Image: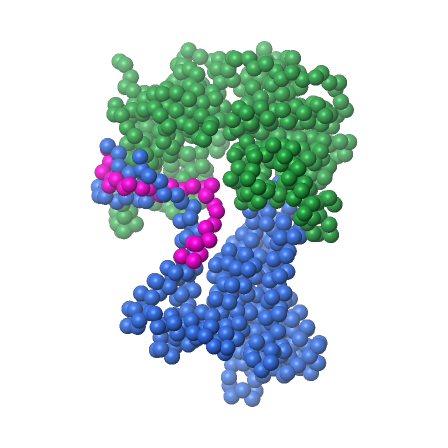
Chain colours: A blue, B green
């Protein structure tokens, strides 16, 4: 028998004491219940609240009162028309990338490469401005979109092909390809495409008006918002009403059963990754053409990664995606405004991480039931 | 010298919902013996052993271990009481080394440093040499062969001081050579006074290795016999039982045209194991052909080949006058083969989706259900509603996730979907597994109606009663080939049982 002393250590799924062991007896135990798969809506809310509380503790540890900080965060993001448009502007790439990863997550393809696909799209769209600088707007914008989508899709394909044919884990490849794309971006902006008149700033020349997406009035809100909204509607419609969407739902719910229904999963993985990458590429295009008007170093503050949290928070639901990308856009904008209080803007990164942490924990704990010990 | 009883389970009952997996079972094993627990799949032997190793708790009944009455609440407690179990699917961490796996769970084993680990490795090596259980102690598990992994599992139980070792279907994953080696090891363990319990359905092994044999059937303990007092033939007899189940009264039918003809089919499953070996069979229109056999003799692969999931190496499959050339699920569905898979929640239904989506499974590509790539939502709902009523599926509404339905209603839903497509051939694998009597009767009625309407059914089941009640013809599968065929009139338990055990009929060579 195991001679190790057992001193009162009680794992949660442990039954409790018997006559022969020296466990402490707990009145309840957690029991895994595989049939309990219903997602409870309040877990999402509770995760956000818990994240706020935990981050509040960190803020307090920094010597600040968390309440005014959160208030500043909120008013910075949603309290003024400037803040609100900025939030919307930030939520465009989040929504597009979030849609991209959502469609992949639907069939359990864990694409975490939206960041790289975003960069690939941004580079390809910029390539149009570099090599065909004189095109009129009605040609250059569609061409930039096509290039952006194609490059993102290609970046997604680089993950999909090893996954389908050689069973290479897509988490690894998509993550690694992020670095490849970001380094390629750095190369072009520090090297061949650097603006000669840019005082050595790592960025391409500023786009002309015919290379920029139209904006709403004199705000910074650009046409990318329309793209995002159209894609959300298409996504919702496709999943619910089309044959292809049905196949995706089936694969997501039970891949084994989907095979029995005659669905070829490998083909779906490739198509879905093309779309997933293409949407992130579109986000990259709309960001350079609509917001920064040039390709530059550090163009994405991690949109592709934040999009993963956006998708998870929304549970891949289209309405949820709109809401959560808006919230996270606000979080980024609010993060900038808390800097005026003397806190680092990475406070919003901390909040994002904490939210994802509690969401995943909630998903796991939700599969257990509390049972009374007999 | 009377043997010491090391484990005694008395009047054990285990209830899973409405189904009784164990019904007042008595079982005991002695120190220094190899005790085989024999029975078909679903006979309740694994459930018994899971209760002994703390995975399940009995609904009622008592367990005495080494002379003390005990309540085993978890595998950890079982280990502390000296019970070790080697599961069919090993519980090993692939990336850790063999010795790390063995000390895993020991308090703070990873903080003890290299010296401690070295000592432990020596200790483990000592145990493994003593019992002839050689494996490289410092290699990660994924580099070991299946046989070596099993040895790691056995040494793990010994290291934890197990006096009682349970092996669940130990030879199902081993090559014949590895199996022989295992039995040598078990003899050595026996000589040390350990109690060994094997669960198995392989008669040959039982006769080769065990001292005593307990046979279970349908959740009950039938008999415990000494090896010296019995024979393979008798064991097969006990295993399949004697009670006569009257065949279902069915209208006599003229033998129809040949619908499915399978000739000399060779199929390889994973790891290059030959699953079907020159298997041939014929199904005619309007008949139920039952395929009986002990689990793992190729039933799963047969069903998968015919439903287009598994490619075959050699042989011909002709269905409805057309030769099938490649494995394609789509093609099988379109040519009228329907498949009720073995495990409905694993491969037949999508648990988190609603009734409509689950009914659409195989027909969503047809014109009635979708148009230009768009699903006909309204029409499909109405159609689903009709099917739910026709097949009497009890559900709160059409959007309820099917995992919330009872097993019987899930199976009704599955049959509703498959029968609605008007298949020419239905392949039903264990269609009543886990269902209560009422639901079983319902499924049997559906199959019989299908046959009476001129369709054919290939009924693959381990439940001999079911096969005998329903089938017009009974085939017996053994080692990937059909070795026995009987008409409804000829089929009796004794003959089927002998074929199932791989024994020949009255000295004749099996086909």
Q: x, y percentage for residue B505?
A: 59, 13
The residue under the point 71% across, 27% down is B455
On the picture, is B271 further left or further right than B96?
Answer: right
| A302, above or below B352, in the image | below
* Quarter of the image with the C terminus of chain B in it: top right
| B90, above or below B234, in the image | below
Q: x, y percentage for residue B162?
A: 30, 31
In magenta stretch: residue A43: yes
Asked which quadrant contains residue B65, the reply is top left
Residue B201 visible in the shown view: no
Instruction: State which region is magenta.
Output: A20-46
Asked which quadrant contains residue B310, the reply is top right
The residue under the point 41% across, 69% down is A348
Q: x, y percentage for residue A275?
A: 62, 60
The residue under the point 30% across, 30% down is B71
The residue under the point 52% across, 75% down is A85
On the picture, is A237 further left or further right than A116?
Answer: right
Q: x, y percentage for residue A208?
A: 63, 83
């Amino acid at each position: 028998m195991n001679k190790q002393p057992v001193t009162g250590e009680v794992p949660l799924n442990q039954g409790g004491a018997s006559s022969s062991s020296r466990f402490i007896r707990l009145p309840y135990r957690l029991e895994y219940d595989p049939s309990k798969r219903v997602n409870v809506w309040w877990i999402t809310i509770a995760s956000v609240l818990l994240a706020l509380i935990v981050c509040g503790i960190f803020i307090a540890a920094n010597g600040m009162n968390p309440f005014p900080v959160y208030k500043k965060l909120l008013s910075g993001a949603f309290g003024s028309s400037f803040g609100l448009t900025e939030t919307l502007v930030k939520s465009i790439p989040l929504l597009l990338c979030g849609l991209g990863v959502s469609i992949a997550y639907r069939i359990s393809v864990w694409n975490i490469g939206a960041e790289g696909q975003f960069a690939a799209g941004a580079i390809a769209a910029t390539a149009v401005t570099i090599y065909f600088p004189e095109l009129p707007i009605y040609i250059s914008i569609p061409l930039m979109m096509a290039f952006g989508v194609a490059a993102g899709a290609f970046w997604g394909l680089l993950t999909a092909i090893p996954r389908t044919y050689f069973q290479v884990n897509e988490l690894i490849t998509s993550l690694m390809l992020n670095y490849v794309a970001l380094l390629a971006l750095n190369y072009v902006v520090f090297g061949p495409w650097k603006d000669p008149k840019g005082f050595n700033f790592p960025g391409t020349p500023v786009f002309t008006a015919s290379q920029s997406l139209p904006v709403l009035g004199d705000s910074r809100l650009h046409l990318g918002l329309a793209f995002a909204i159209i894609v959300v509607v298409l996504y919702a419609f496709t999943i619910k009403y089309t044959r292809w969407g049905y196949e995706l739902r089936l694969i997501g719910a039970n891949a084994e059963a989907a095979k029995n229904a005659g669905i070829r999963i490998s083909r779906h993985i490739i198509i879905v990754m093309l779309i997933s990458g293409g949407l992130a590429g579109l986000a990259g295009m709309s960001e350079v053409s609509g917001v920064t008007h040039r390709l530059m170093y550090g163009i994405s503050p991690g949109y592709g990664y934040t999009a993963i949290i956006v998708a998870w928070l929304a549970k891949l639901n289209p309405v949820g995606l709109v809401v959560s990308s808006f919230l996270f856009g606000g979080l980024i904008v609010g993060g900038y405004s808390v800097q005026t209080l003397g806190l680092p803007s990475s406070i919003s990164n901390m909040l994002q991480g904490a939210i994802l942490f509690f969401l995943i924990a909630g998903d796991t704990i939700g599969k257990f039931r509390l049972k009374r010990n007999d | 010298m009377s043997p010491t009883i090391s484990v005694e389970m008395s009047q054990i009952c285990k209830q899973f919902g409405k189904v009784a997996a164990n019904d007042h079972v008595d079982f005991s094993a002695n120190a220094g013996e190899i005790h085989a627990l024999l029975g078909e799949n679903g006979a309740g032997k694994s459930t018994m052993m899971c209760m002994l190793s703390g995975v399940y708790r009995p609904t009622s009944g008592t367990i005495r271990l080494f002379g003390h009455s005990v309540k085993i609440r978890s595998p950890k407690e079982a280990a502390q009481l000296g019970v070790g179990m080697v599961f069919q699917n090993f519980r090993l961490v692939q990336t850790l080394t063999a010795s790390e796996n063995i000390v895993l769970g020991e308090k703070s084993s990873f903080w003890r440093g290299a010296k401690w680990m070295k000592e432990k490795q020596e200790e483990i090596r000592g145990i493994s040499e003593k019992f002839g259980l050689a494996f490289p102690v410092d290699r990660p598990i994924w580099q070991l062969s299946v046989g070596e992994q099993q040895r790691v599992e056995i040494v793990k139980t010994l290291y934890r001081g197990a006096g009682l070792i349970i092996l669940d279907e130990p030879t199902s994953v081993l090559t014949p050579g590895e199996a022989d080696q295992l039995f040598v090891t078990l003899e050595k363990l026996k000589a040390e006074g350990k109690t060994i319990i094997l669960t198995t359905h392989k008669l040959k092994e039982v006769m080769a290795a065990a001292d005593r044999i307990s046979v279970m059937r349908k959740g009950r303990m039938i008999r415990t016999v000494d090896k010296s007092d019995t024979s393979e033939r008798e064991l097969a007899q006990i295993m399949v039982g004697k009670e006569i189940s009257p065949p279902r009264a069915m209208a006599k039918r003229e033998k129809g045209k040949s619908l499915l003809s399978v000739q000399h089919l060779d199929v390889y499953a994973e790891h290059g194991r030959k699953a079907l070996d020159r298997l041939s069979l014929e199904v005619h229109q309007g008949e139920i052909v039952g395929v009986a056999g002990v689990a793992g003799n190729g039933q799963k692969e047969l069903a998968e080949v015919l439903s287009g999931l598994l490619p075959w190496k050699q042989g011909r499959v002709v269905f409805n006058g057309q030769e099938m050339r490649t494995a394609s699920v789509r093609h099988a569905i379109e040519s009228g083969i329907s498949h009720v898979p073995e495990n409905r929640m694993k491969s037949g239904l999508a648990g988190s989706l609603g009734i409509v989506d689950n009914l659409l499974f195989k027909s969503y590509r047809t014109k009635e259900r979708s148009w230009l790539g768009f699903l006909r939502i309204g029409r499909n709902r109405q159609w689903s509603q009709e099917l739910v009523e026709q097949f009497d599926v009890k559900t709160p509404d059409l959007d309820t996730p099917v995992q919330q339905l009872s097993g019987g209603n899930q199976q009704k839903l599955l049959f509703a979907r498959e029968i609605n497509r008007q298949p020419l051939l239905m392949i039903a694998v264990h269609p009543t597994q886990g269902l209560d009597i009422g639901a079983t009767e319902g499924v049997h009625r559906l199959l019989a109606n299908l046959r009476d309407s001129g369709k054919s059914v290939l009924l693959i089941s381990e439940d001999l009663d079911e096969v005998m009640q329903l089938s017009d013809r009974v085939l017996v599968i053994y080692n990937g080939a059909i070795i026995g065929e009987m008409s409804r009139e000829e089929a009796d338990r004794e003959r089927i049982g002998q074929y199932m055990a791989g024994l020949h009929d009255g000295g004749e060579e099996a086909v």
